[in-house]
Image: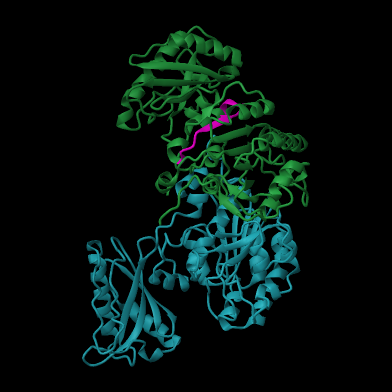
Chain colours: A cyan, B green
């Protein structure tokens, strides 16, 4: 199917906007009550929904709770199960580290080792991020022949290491035994092609231990989740789109770059996103606009604050509409109900607004209303296909 | 799945009618307006919809605009992506040429070559169809050892050539370089098994040039889209049906024959279709009735004329119902909105009327009404499966 789609797509200058409210989907606060989106006062979204085709989407599959990266991959038109993104890559993307094809990244935890070399604390007393950054600076001195090594702080005791060089592979086992009182494991190649990488990792760990020897409590490192960049065909290659990401948070710029999107740096807020949208309007044909805080307030369990974030996006919407996109999708990458304080498996409402469409008379942009929309419940990656079809960016199949 | 279905099917004498209004799906003429089908006065279809299960179908997939041949394959229960139909076959089907398994067909364009043998006009001055037919007659004199050759006019400078013989393959490259000032390319086997066919094509082109040498302006031929009949299991084999096509246009008889349907010749209009339906009622159990002009008027961009064509089919409907089919599907093979003047990717409304079913209370046969029907949006090839199931033509799966 993917190959068929690739052969059918052709650029035509039409403009598609994908506006993502992270964690948009919600749940009623109390039995019989309304969700965050149903509660929010959203006159602009409601008017748009009334002129749109609506539905719900499943980012990954029935019952599957999406992580942020696969949730977005889905919205960009990729089956997340076909393109798993390893822990090391997620960590590197999460801090905006610009991984390249062939790089191998791993999560690095600072740990405490006893005099015998056994692990006494897998989290080094949960050192603060500042300390973590300081230790990462020290590890810049590590040199492994034939590769470049990058060590970057993430949060608390968590960091990420990236190896760059020729012939690397992520088929390497974790050094974290996930147990106390035993020594860290050696990294082992689980495939012959990773023998070199396992050796590189081993040398890195040995050099790091030397440098950290005098540190307290973080005198060792544990590596896990070795991962290469997945080989994802770009949106340009698949869909002949020239896409750009307008996101505030590094994670979302990272996942956008994974599919070949240009990601704009130094955007602070919705105002900045609107300005960049206008600035880039003529040079691109696919615009991914990401709003993080609906998810953050859901994770906080703050129902009212999530409602307010939805209302902020509603107030922002006219600035998108002013550009007169040929097609606009408004949706989320997953549900983050405030009552759950976490991502959940519930389907995510969407509206798809286009000149050539059949508005289905949904009066209010909400989960239950969208559930009555024409599309019912569809797989997330199909949204962009419909968008390509409705804007004439896919040629006719067959004579 | 296909094999499981094949094992479950058994003939039982129940009668299924598939009534296709080509290009049925439409779009509102103006924002907030109605589609062609929603506009049409269709008392018979509306009454039928009220007693039917309704929904929308996607002939090929989300966002994919169907060509006519794959759109019909889908309605006959085949995944069109699994059975691509090449340009040569479409051309041969389009004129009702009875291709057989093993035949290789290619589109043939008459062209003008200069004294040096380079192409000066890829369309030979767009010679009229009469001239094309005359040249095809001349090419009957071409003889290539070991194969039968058929050359048939299509329209203007376009014709089709069919090679019939043992060991032919369609893995042959185009001779049309799609450029002027260069000589036609030699046909080349893109797979070793096509070496013989490439040689046959080369000899045909050389012989054709000799015969056409004194012609002006059509003194050469260009071949493209070499294609074999796809190996499609017949509806008889898969579904144990004995199907018949009641179509006016050759293309639809052609695609029906591809799946092993009998196709009746010399039907002029809906009246002829009704008469044939009655005549063949006792000898067949699947009846495909095709109405072309809904699509034609959509392609013309004539909204009102498309509405009228729908109303003609509505007036025809009682003649189908008079036969008391056990199950009747009314739908289209794709959407051809008058505002688009082309096939589009929009889902297609359908109704499925059967004794054993659960009418969903749709009051009007229209895109938005069907979107509220029980089936939501389903893949086109599933329609016939539901029909087989509801008429008891598929046995129970498992004990």
The structure residue drawn at horizontal position 48% and vertical position 44%, both measured from the top left corner, is B79
Task: Give percent across and percent down for residue A310.
Answer: 67, 73
- Which residues are the magenta region? B239-252
Q: In the visual, does B40 lie left or right of B381?
A: right
Q: Nearer the viewer, residue B345 or B75?
A: B75
Q: Is residue A35 left or right of residue A82?
A: right
Observer-nearest of A271 and A18 = A18
Q: Quadrant of residue B24?
A: top right
- The answer, for residue A220, to whether it is visible in the render is yes
- Would residue B176 be seen by someone viewing this image from the given angle? no
Q: Quadrant of residue A306?
A: bottom right
Instruction: Where is residue A345? Give x, y as percent.
Output: 52, 71
How many marks do you count on the picture? 0
Q: Is residue B242 left or right of residue A209?
A: right
Q: Tell which of B37 and A130 is nearer to you.
A: B37
**A115 versus A148 height, above or below:** below
**Vertical placement of residue B372 versus B30, above or below:** below
Does the magenta portion include B52?
no
């Amino acid at each position: 199917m993917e190959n068929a789609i690739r052969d059918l797509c052709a650029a035509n200058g039409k403009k598609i906007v994908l506006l993502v409210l992270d964690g948009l989907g919600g749940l009623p606060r109390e039995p019989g009550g309304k969700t965050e989106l149903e509660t929010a006062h959203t006159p602009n979204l409601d008017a748009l929904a009334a002129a749109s085709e609506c539905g719900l989407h499943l980012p990954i599959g029935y019952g599957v709770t999406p992580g942020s990266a696969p949730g977005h991959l889905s919205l960009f038109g990729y089956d997340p199960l076909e393109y798993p993104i390893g822990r090391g890559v997620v960590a590197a993307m999460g801090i905006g580290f610009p991984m390249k094809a062939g790089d191998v990244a791993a999560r690095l935890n600072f740990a405490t080792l006893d005099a015998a070399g056994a692990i006494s604390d897998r989290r080094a007393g949960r050192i603060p991020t500042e300390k973590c950054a300081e230790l990462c600076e020290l590890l810049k001195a590590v040199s492994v022949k034939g590769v470049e090594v990058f060590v970057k702080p993430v949060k608390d005791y968590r960091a990420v290491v990236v190896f760059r060089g020729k012939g690397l592979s992520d088929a390497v086992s974790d050094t974290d035994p996930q147990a106390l009182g035993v020594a860290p494991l050696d990294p082992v190649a689980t495939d012959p092609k990773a023998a070199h990488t396992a050796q590189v990792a081993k040398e890195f760990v040995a050099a790091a231990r030397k440098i950290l020897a005098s540190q307290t409590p973080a005198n060792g490192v544990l590596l896990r989740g070795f991962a290469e960049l997945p080989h994802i065909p770009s949106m340009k290659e698949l869909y002949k789109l020239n896409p750009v990401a307008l996101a505030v948070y590094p994670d979302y710029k990272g996942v956008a770059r994974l599919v070949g999107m240009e990601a704009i740096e130094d955007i602070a807020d919705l105002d900045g996103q609107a300005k960049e949208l206008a600035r880039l309007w003529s040079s691109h044909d696919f615009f991914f606009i990401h709003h993080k805080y609906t998810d953050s307030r859901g994770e906080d369990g703050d129902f009212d604050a999530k409602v307010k974030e939805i209302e902020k996006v509603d107030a922002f919407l006219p600035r998108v509409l002013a550009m007169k996109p040929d097609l606009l999708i408004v949706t989320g990458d997953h549900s983050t109900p405030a009552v759950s304080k976490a991502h959940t498996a519930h389907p995510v409402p969407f509206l798809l607004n286009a000149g050539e469409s059949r508005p289905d008379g949904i009066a209010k942009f909400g989960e239950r209303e969208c559930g009555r929309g024409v599309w019912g419940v569809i797989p997330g990656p199909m949204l962009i296909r419909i968008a390509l079809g409705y804007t004439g960016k896919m040629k006719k199949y067959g004579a």
